[in-house]
Amino acid sequence: MTDYNQQLEDLKNGIVESITIEKEDFLEFRTVLIGREDFKHFRGTAYHHGTTVYTYTIEPSK
């Protein structure tokens, strides 16, 4: 099982610039993401074939 929480921490701390999530992993990833207090700081950009790339933003989404 992938440690999505650690990947999100690495993204938040600037260790990585983005996280790429494939379609088949999205629901598992989303469960971890929305469980975080700071989930509105993560911005996902969807691409063809269900790939989503997440980045971290200083300002939370509204």
Image: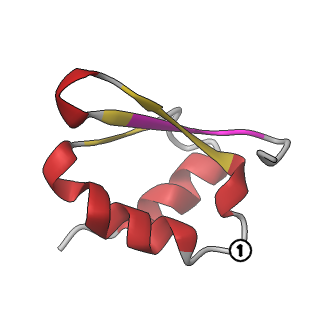
Residue 44: % across, % down: 51, 38
Q: Which residues are magenta?
A: 53-57
The residue located at (41%, 73%) in the rendering is 31
The residue located at (50%, 65%) in the rendering is 33
Which of the pair 35/19 is nearer the observer? 35
The residue located at (56%, 61%) in the rendering is 9
Would you say 51 lies left or right of 60 here?
Answer: left
**In the depicted structure, whether residue 39 falls above or below residue 14:** below
Query: Is label 1 in a helix, a strand or a loop?
Result: loop
Residue sitting farthest toward the front: 62
Which of the pair 47/2 is nearer the observer? 47
Residue 61: % across, % down: 77, 45
Q: Does 54 lie within the magenta span?
A: yes
Quarter of the image that includes the N terminus: bottom left
The residue located at (35%, 63%) in the rendering is 29
The quarter of the displayed image where residue 48 is located: top left
Q: Main secondary structure of the magenta part?
A: strand
Crowding at label 1, few (<14), some or many (≥20) Cα neighbours within 10 Å?
few
The quarter of the displayed image where residue 4 is located: bottom left
Q: Does 15 lie within the magenta span?
A: no
Residue sitting farthest toward the top: 48
Q: How is the image coloured?
A: secondary structure
Would you say 26 lies left or right of 24 here?
Answer: right
Say which residue label 1 marks.
Answer: 37
Residue 20: % across, % down: 33, 38
